Amino acid sequence: MTTPDPPPARELLRTEGIRKTFPGVVALDGVDFDLRAGEVHVLLGENGAGKSTLIKVLSGTYRPDEGRVLCDGRTVRIADAEAAEKLGIATIHQEFNLVPHLSVAENIFLGRQPRRLGLVDRRKMEADAKVLLDRVGITASPRTPVGKLGIAGRQMVEIAKALSLRTRILIMDEPTAVLTAEEVNRLFAIVRKLRAEGVGIVFITHHLEEIPAIGDRVTVLRDGRSVGQVPAGTRQEELVRLMVGRSIEQQYPRQAAPAQGAGAGSGAPLLRVTGLRRQGVFDNVSFEVRAGEVVGIAGLVGAGRTEVVRAVFGADRYDAGRVEVSGKRLPGGDVWASHSAGLGLVPEDRKGQGLLPDASVSENLGLVTLREASKGGLVDRAGQRRAASRIAERLGVRMAGLDQHVRTLSGGNQQKVVIGKWLLANSRVLILDEPTRGIDVGAKVEIYQLINELTASGHAVLMISSDLPEVLGMSDRVLVMSQGRIAGELTAREATQDAVMALAVGTSAPGTSEMEDSPRGH
Amino acid sequence: MAIDTQPGHRLDKRPGGKRGPNPARRVVEDTGRVLQDNGALVALLVLVLVLSFWTSNFFTATNLLNVGVQAAVTAILAFGVTFAIVSGGIDLSVGSVAAFSGVMLGWFTTTQGMPVFVGVLLAILSGTACGLLNGILISYGKLPPFIATLAMLSAARGLAQVVSEGSPVVLPDSLSWIGKTIGEWLPVPVIVMIVMGLLAALVLNRTYSGRSMYAIGGNEEAAHLSGIRVRRQKLVIYTLVGAFAAVAGIVLASRLASAQPTAAEGYELDAIAAVVIGGASLAGGVGKASGTLIGALILAVLRNGLNLLDVSAFWQQVVIGVVIALAVLLDTLRRRA
């Protein structure tokens, strides 16, 4: 690996030829990487490229099969989390390691609480915590239970915890994925401060536009190999080419069906929602989705988008209004009835709500159709397996076999499984809530192509997305929600980032400034 | 691995293999894996083998059938508990419900003088009703299964005492065949155990409710959002557990020829132990009827063998405790590997 200029700073960490295999999968296949003091080194790659495995090697969760890790020029063995901690390596995972019921101070010093006469010295612990909290710039009291903080606050607590360990190497796994634009800016300010203090930071992100804003160098992983190291100023197209091994011509290949779609194009309304209301959450929500159409729902976090689609689907109740699928009214609050009527939901939290993580691909695919596959009280499991095999092939789910646990699939393939179970149920209307969140660029395009195929064959798609370019690129119409109401509807032609944002912020909503949807890093 | 430029690169054709060219080594590895995957079965076989060599009277037809009879009640209870555990719940009330059902059997057939088959049917219904009540508390009352069934553990035991007025009910002679043998050698409890085991396996593997148990235990929210009526299924699950407990209670009372309100005390813990030794996860989503049977047999073989070896009842408890801990420990180690 050549470096563009002579090392300006001390090298903290280096990996050489790291290789790690799991049964059936080569996760890392020769990774070279290095980190200097006072730099932000971005680790880029599609999901499944090996980023997570690499940071698990660095944080002591996995031991590499081959290759070596050097810390300050010395070869080290990072056998466990404790060893990593001794070397000054701290990792902030996507899922935080915090105890919700304990206070901020206790979380920061968990297992290392300052003691006096063998008892925890609460006062000192809280005072020390306060100093750390000031450093990361949050105002919460050290006594606040962590569960009461928002996602951004919890992340700051994790960073404070890392600081308390005298961390020299901070690994952050997609820290911006869950943050609003404003929170991202605050995070960047802290990262820059740490960098100025000489901390080396490994920063993982899927948002290419964040790279020039925060990074110094970029290492790209592909198929478990490090395929390039470039400066952070590298053009996005070049980064994408390195990630996927070819350039992605069109990121949002929406082929609008209404104009061309044979038959389906005329667009009978498949889903009609009228005057839907839940006290204090959403009100007067009306819209329809026609066959062959993708309707996007944009809006700020907390605008009530997920709440509305969950109510439409019957996962939650509503107080007033009606939901019709293909002209038939749904009873409300009854998922089974929605499913029978041909409505399917791909929820926003894939692992938490969409999948049985420790069950097989085939069991997950057969979940919705369990009852249809039952005859005389018995489930036709062989038939279910055949159906699962058919749909997995059609969707191109990459797996070792139908018996592989879905937990071990990549995010994109997991999402295909969630969509697949509804396709098996012949759902004609699909509600997709953040369908590409946490999915890498290449798999996103596959999901978009799938949406195109579905609408071309007469399905209707209702898609929530906080990724504004995505919602604009894929929708035939865009509904913009603001404060529990539909603030406006835009045709594909009218829908620009500015127009959507104007509606989402809404003139009636002074003080609303948190805008998850705004393009980041400008 | 979205757009894979080299398909097949990531997927080693032979999962688990360490790409060793040595076929003998592969056989050893494969055998090792089979043994690891069936840890409980291997443990049972080892136990049987050791006891067969160690004692002269363990591996005799009479004794083995005896072990079967001893295992039967625990196994039938445990089959029911498997449903609860697979769905991510627990049932602590099965011992009490078994005793209550047994007492009801006595009450129907003696005090009320009903025909035996009606009595058996009503006894099963009594246990089933307890299970249904558990299910209502859990699915509609939103009580945690631990609490709901803990309450039932106390209430059903109390009801058994109330109905029997605190003393054993002697069962009519026409019922004693349930505790005896067919053709002079095949014990009826063992037959009931096998039938209930097959039934449990059928429920778990092939019925809508059974598959729902795995889905609910694997991820309740995902199951709900996939159109599974979680509340209704929980009702079914705990009702089934109650029915299985009732059958166990009837077998136990018939074996003793009397229904005792204090019968099966602590059996719920044996049942849970059998399920866990059999490889089920208390977190839900994992578990098999065959595993549960093996778990119950391990407990029975251990008790029987320790008796034959003249180990005191006190030490037996210690050994059983160690075995439970070891079984789960080995299972955890295997999963981590």
Image (cartoon, helix red, strand yellow):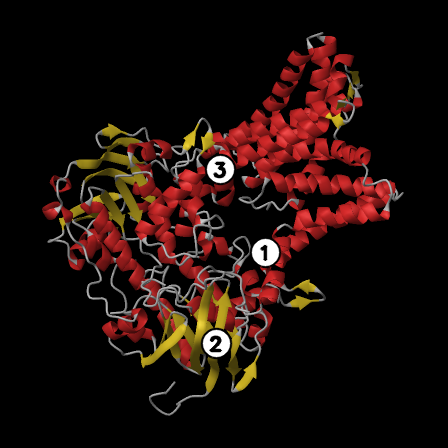
Please provide percent x and percent y for residue A134. Answer: 46, 69
Q: Amino acid at mark 1?
A: Arg
Q: Which residue is mark 2?
A: A18
Q: Is residue A4 left or right of residue B247?
A: left
Q: Amino acid at mark 2?
A: Ile
Under circle 2, the secondary element is: strand
Under circle 1, the secondary element is: helix
Reply above or below: B321 against A411.
Answer: above
Q: Which residue is mark 3?
A: B211
Reply above or below: A228 against A8.
Answer: above
Under circle 3, the secondary element is: helix
Residue for point 62% across, 57% down: B31
The chain holding disc 2 is A
Q: Which residue is mark 1?
A: B335
Residue at the farthest front position: B23
The chain holding disc 3 is B
Same-chain status of marks 1 and 2 = no
Name the foreground residue: A129 vs A477. A477
Label 1 close to label 2 by CB (< 8 Å): no
Please provide percent x and percent y for residue A234. Answer: 27, 78
Please provide percent x and percent y for residue A197. Answer: 44, 81
For the N terminus of chain B, the quadrant is bottom left
Q: Is residue B93 visible?
A: no
Q: CA distance from mark 3 to mark 2?
A: 42 Å
Same-chain status of marks 3 and 2 = no
Residue for point 85% across, 46% down: B315
